Amino acid sequence: MTQTPQLPPQLPPEPLDAAERDLARMLRNLPSGSPSPELDARILGVARRAVHQAQPRKLHWGRSIGIGTAASALLAVGLFVKMHGAGENLQPETPPAAVKMINAPAAAARTEAEAAAPAGQPAAAENSVMAPKEIATSPPPPPVVTENEMPMSAPAPRMLRVSPSPPPPPMEMPARAEASGALVAKPSPNAFPFAPAPAPAAPAINPPSPQAPVVMQESQPESVAAPAPVPPPADGRGEDKAESFTAARQDAQNQAAAATPPAQGLLDKKDAAQSQAEMKSAPAASGYANPNATTSTTDGTKAKNLDMITVTGSRVRRVDTETASPVLRLSRDELSAIDDDAKLAPMQWIERIRARMKADDDGGARESLRRFHVRYPDAAIPDDLQPLLH
Amino acid sequence: MDPDPTDEALMMAYGRGDVDAFETLYARHRGGLFRYLVRHLRQQSLAEECFQDVWSRLIAARERYRPEARFSTWLYQIASNRLTDHWRSQGRQGSFVEDGAERAEREPDPSTPDHELSEFEQRRHLQLALEELPPEQREAVLLRLDRELGLEEIAQITGVGRETVKSRLRYAMDKLRARLSS
């Protein structure tokens, strides 16, 4: 029942002297009574309840541990499934500055690869994409990253929405891509060398389909990067389809570039300069050529039914994308004048913005105030200028 | 299994959930503790209230108990703290002497030559003398005479130094002897 604990050191006995013994004897004879049975029962009941109340707490704690363990296991399984599913699309090498595009081209390339394989060997064709030998002999592949697989720390890329566009191949697609109506693709150079596409695969790509917009997604928001020069196919049968896709994408990029300047008017010059620098450096880093370099490879069929391009992305600040309505058009001189506003002291800057409002220069006032808010995010905006921020 | 476990072993066992160990422990100390409280507080109902509080505090602290001192020292330390709380809540620590004096006045004068003190009267005078003592002196003398504890252990229970206990005991014993011999 019990274990003998380490006993405390015994104090030396101090026996009572004679006078104390007499008093002690008399004291013991004093009536003192004893605790009543009710009191005894009450105390013993308290002792029992205290122990019984402690035991369910331990059981509850054990149950909590079990629930926590089950939750951890579920999370681990979910991560495994997620990573396993992602592994089908992820290439083994991921250049850090690579352009990530939503993978309609990859799907098309896969379509071509599967179509080029014998009818009974689509799986073999797909497996060959991941074969180490093929990867080793192919150029460094740009990664395929779906929207759902973008790393959390990566900036949200600008998206070019092209509608209508070449439809998705009528074969296996990621379920989430089908659900979202967007196909995630990449220009996959290594898909072409072993993808001798037969002729019947071409119609699956070229006819426009208004129900299936293709979303091309890029990590370099200001630049419209073109794919790397496509290696010549092994037998040339897939060249038409590859070129047609490349041309369609190039056409979309050109239209996006044409539509970009009004939107870029909302950006800081700093961002614009930075984006231009990135535009120059990114292709070299990612293995993609700039649009001029790819022009020679895009002289094939082009998709000409583009009717809308929407430019979004993290490089466009939220204040620009969510509050810049209507779009401001500012001339170079006006922008220069707004630059001069930024050289003023904060109070003078505010007064200058008010002066612009009084002069009916709402666009200049709005842009100047936006820059003021960017520079002094903690500064309180006067009430009379608040509408300019919204 | 130890057939005669120590108080410390029983308390450790109860801390682990052994209710039987507590019952054994309670049976060992219920009488002594209750007597100590009754002689301290003079009222049965008040003593019962404090008695229950002391055991409740012990039960609540069962998982924190470590045998760093004898169990009885710990138990009477809890009782001493409870008594201190009681006197503080009464706010009249010195009034106990007055109550004792008032009661002594109601008693027949023992110094009269024609009054032969019986053993019963001596015990009663002892009780009155105890009531006249300040609480801290009464506490020390009760622990010494009733529990036969040494100075060191009384000092641990009451939370004062050994010399302070020695001084309190000396004053208390002198008053008791004077009261009984008068």
Image: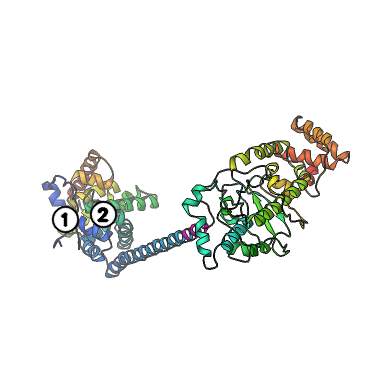
How packed mark 2 is, by other alpha carbons closer than 10 Å (few <14, some 14-19, many 20 or more), is some
Question: What's the distance in space between the residues labelled 2 and 1, CA to CA?
Answer: 24 Å
Q: Where does the N terminus of chain A fall, quadrant-wise?
A: bottom left
Query: What span is colored magenta in the figure?
Result: A79-92
In the foreground, B151 or A190: A190
Label 1 amino acid?
Met
Q: Which residue is mark 2?
A: B75
In the foreground, A326 or A172: A172
* Label 2: which secondary element: helix
In the foreground, B7 or A211: A211
Circle number at residue B178: none
Q: Position of residue A60 (x, y in %)?
A: 39, 64
Q: Position of residue A76 (x, y in %)?
A: 45, 59
Q: Image height check: is A70 above or below B156?
A: below
Q: Image height check: is B95 above or below A115?
A: above
Label 2 amino acid?
Leu
Q: Position of residue A80 (x, y in %)?
A: 46, 59
Q: Which residue is mark 1?
A: A26
